[in-house]
Image (spheres, rainbow, N blue to C red):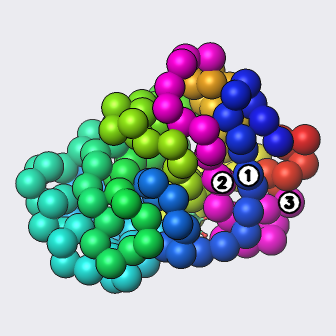
């Protein structure tokens, strides 16, 4: 489907296998790795990603930082930090929105064309997928109104349940 000029693809898969300009990591404030997507990216991507992450000295929630992608097939990794659900009162929505929007803005600053996102915050950070998908769509719609180099956004789902929820919502 398209949102504005941008192709949006909802797919099942492992984000570490995406051959795109940038994959987004669901990172934490330290940017020093963890489990889930973060663990998979650092494990497959190798030590050069961690070396670059260390130089960023962390990342506030809702923001994003960029590194190259080491041994991964993408060119860059954008490390975005989503909120831990329920910790920040009414700030969860805006922080998740910011994590997506700031990742897209950073990709555009690097003149990138294609980017793949995991479902940020909906794993160990506990954000309900039905609430998250509405925020993701809003972020993509608003970003599409700004002129940028981004032509393709892939939303990579790791479970059939999440895939179906995304497909239903985006339709
Ligand atoms: N490809 C695509 N999606 C994946 C993959 C993968 N290889 N692996 C897991 N998912 P999570 P969060 C899905 O927990 O909730 C880490 O420890 C997963 O099923 O990775 O933002 C960090 O260091 C879920 O739907 O990220 C942080 O401390 C989604 O990706 C914390 O977890 C996000 O799950 C961040 O938690």
Residue identifier under label 3: 164
Judge from the rendering whether residue 1 lies leftward or rightward of residue 53; answer left or right: right
Please name which of the two marks, 2 or 1, marks the residue nearer to the observer.
1
* Frontmost residue, 76 versus 136: 76
- Label 1, secondary structure: give it: strand
Mark 3 vs mark 2: which is more N-terminal? 2
Can the viewer see residue 100?
Answer: no
Residue identifier under label 1: 9
Please name which of the two marks, 3 or 2, marks the residue nearer to the observer.
2
72, above or below 128, in the image? below
Residue identifier under label 2: 155
Q: Position of residue 103 (x, y in %)?
A: 43, 40
The residue stretch that appears in magenta? 145-164
5, above or below 154, in the image? above
Cα distance, mark 3 to mark 1? 13 Å
Residue 40 colored magenta?
Answer: no
Q: Which quadrant of the figure has residue 55?
A: bottom left
Q: Position of residue 95 (x, y in %)?
A: 46, 33
Badge 1 crowding class, 10 Å Cα cut-off, few under 14, some 14 to 19, many 20 or more, is: some
Mark 2 vs mark 1: which is more N-terminal? 1
Q: Is mark 2 within 8 Å of ligand 1?
A: no
7, above or below 94, in the image? below
Which quadrant would the N terminus be assigned to in this image? top right
56, above or below 27, in the image? above
Q: Position of residue 100 (x, y in %)?
A: 51, 39
Q: Does the CB distance between marks 2 and 1 fall below 8 Å? A: yes
- Label 3, secondary structure: give it: helix
* Frontmost residue, 112 versus 45: 112
Which quadrant would the C terminus be assigned to in this image? top right
- Label 2, secondary structure: give it: strand
Q: Position of residue 40 (x, y in %)?
A: 43, 78
Can the viewer see residue 80?
Answer: yes
């Amino acid at each position: 489907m398209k949102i504005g000029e941008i192709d949006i693809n909802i797919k099942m898969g492992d984000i570490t296998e995406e051959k795109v300009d940038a994959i987004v990591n669901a990172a934490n404030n330290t940017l020093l790795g963890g489990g889930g997507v973060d663990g998979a990216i650092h494990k497959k991507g190798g030590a050069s990603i961690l070396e670059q992450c260390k130089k960023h000295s962390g990342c506030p929630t809702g923001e994003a930082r960029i590194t190259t992608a080491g041994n991964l097939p993408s060119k860059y990794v954008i490390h975005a930090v989503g909120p831990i659900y329920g910790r920040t009162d009414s700030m969860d929505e805006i922080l998740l929105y910011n994590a997506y929007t700031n990742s897209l803005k950073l990709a555009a600053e690097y003149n990138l064309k294609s980017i793949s996102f995991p479902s940020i915050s909906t794993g160990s950070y506990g954000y309900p997928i039905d609430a998250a998908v509405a925020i993701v769509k809003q972020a993509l719609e608003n970003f599409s109104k700004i002129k940028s180099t981004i032509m393709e956004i892939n939303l990579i789902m790791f479970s059939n349940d999440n895939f179906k929820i995304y497909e239903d919502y985006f339709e």
